[in-house]
Image (cartoon, grey):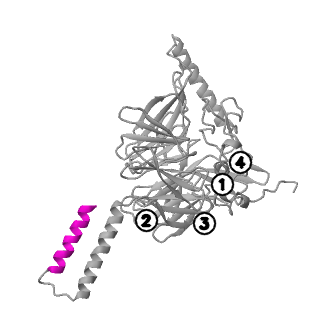
Amino acid sequence: MKHLKPLNKKARKIEAAAHQQADSGSRAESKPDVRALQQAPQLPLGCALIFDPGWETDSSGQMTGLCQPMESDLYGCYDECWWPAQLPDQLTSFLEWSDKCASASRDWRKLDLVPTDNQ
Amino acid sequence: MKGRWAIMFWTTRVILRSPRLRLSPRAHLAIALGLLLLATSLGWSQDHDYFVLGIHPAGLLVIDTSRDEIVAQIPTKGRSPKEIIPSPDGKHVFLTTDGRAKIEVVNVPDRKVEEVIDLAQPGVKINIFGLAVSRKGDRLFAHIRPVKQLPDEYVALPPEIWSVDLNTHAKKKIMDAPDGVVSLFVPADPNRLIAWGRNVYFIDLAQRHVVETVPLQTGLLPDQSPMDTLPFFSQYEQSGIVSMPSFATNPFTHNLVLGLVNMDVDTGKLDFMELGPPIPLYSSVVSPDRKRAYLVMNQLVVVDLTQRKIAEVRDTEGTTYVVNLTRDGKKVYLPSSAGPFVNVYDAQSLKRIHSIELPGDPSSSQLRALPPGAVP
């Protein structure tokens, strides 16, 4: 039963937002969705502020707005896979990659090799 | 400090010159040395400020801020400590290691890992984002993100909040957690837990569900803009205020606005302030007198909290994830995000006064102060 009618622009927006939330809520309940966490609003920071390892995109759904390998530090990427850097990740796949390397800038030669499927 | 030494000196003098005491010179010496040791330990425990910091590949450092020196390096069982939570008495430190998969209990005075807590069920891998210890020091809370590892598929399971009884070692799931939680905080009310992620959630531990939500990202009205915060590097023990830079787009001008969100950990009361055009920033810490906040990334930004505006911006020597202050608010510590050192700045002049060389990279490890009186 509906008792209230939106009369102005803001009220109509509120009603639309309420519908949108109800729709997305029911969708989420019916089927879990895996998707990249889109960064909105656009941030100048580089990394996505909603953290979900390996699934971040910028506000346009791309990765160009995120930190790039050349501007990130090695372990910042490796530790928690924050950025789409070409590095192994410590969270899931390559836990031992840096075991012999206490400092990336000092001992980088001690970083381990990462085998790929065809090696 | 001087007063305490003077009292100790005169007490010693009075004791040793007491006509009732007929002591040998050796006994005199023993009493004097004993009192001197007592004074020294009191001095250390009262005035020394110790930080704990994780380093690559597997270690925890204890740093004495009075000398800006490393006083202990404790090997950890797992790799790269991230979240670091000291117990209320400062004797133990709880760490997440091995890619946030495990919790290690470090006995600081004994310089060893006492216990490794694994909350993962068989066939399930977890990552811990959010660790907190109760104010009594008897319960540990952890927010976990479980992933079921099937032979050909990873299935993300709902995130959960668990508690570990530190006396009985019993582990108990409290509830399914809202999505996107990154940090946990323990307020003064022992029946509450605060979870910070897309929104700030206040959890009733007896009812085991969220009883209040302060919206940051979801559930906003159309004229409100989603607010981004990065609740990974929350160092709040010196002020009791959790502080985070925030970013939001003004819905009318569409300009990005930098702000600061401060939360009183005791009460959970939030304070939002706008600071102006955005400056890239990772984290923030509030001074013990609650008058200034220090924000870091590639710059050190000082916010005057009484006037609610940026007071000063200084370039730093590199990128920093975390920042913390000494208990007297005089020195600011910035561990390097990419090199094996911690830079120390004067909190007033913002000049670099020291650089402490480390045996490994701290990267994105938290830097936490041990509670007053802790003697590592």
Please tell me whether residue B15 belongs to the stretch shown in magenta.
Answer: yes
Asked if marks 4 and 3 touch (Cβ < 8 Å), the reply is no
Tell me residue B325's x, y (percent): 43, 50
SS state under label 2: loop
Q: Count the numbered circles shown.
A: 4
Q: Which residue is disc 4 drawn over?
A: B155
**Measured from the top left, where is residue B290 in percent x and y?**
36, 42
Q: Amino acid at mark 4?
A: Val
- Whether residue B353 is visible here, answered yes or no, is yes
Q: CA separation, marks 4 and 3?
A: 28 Å
Do discs 4 and 2 share a chain? yes
Give the distance between the C-alpha atoms of the residues marked 2 and 3, in whole angstroms: 18 Å
Label disc, if present, on residue B77 of the rendered structure = 3
User: Disc 2 marks which amino acid?
Assistant: Lys
Choose the circle earlier in sequence order: 4 or 3: 3
Pointer 4 or 2: first along the chain: 2
State if disc 2 and disc 1 touch (CB < 8 Å).
no
Foreground tag (4 vs 3): 3
Rendered residue at 23%/87% (across/down): B25
- The residue at which mark 1 appears reads as A105
- Disc 2 target residue: B91
Horizontal and vertical percent position of residue A10: 52, 15
At x 55%, y 55%, the residue is B341
Residue type at numbered disc 3:
Lys
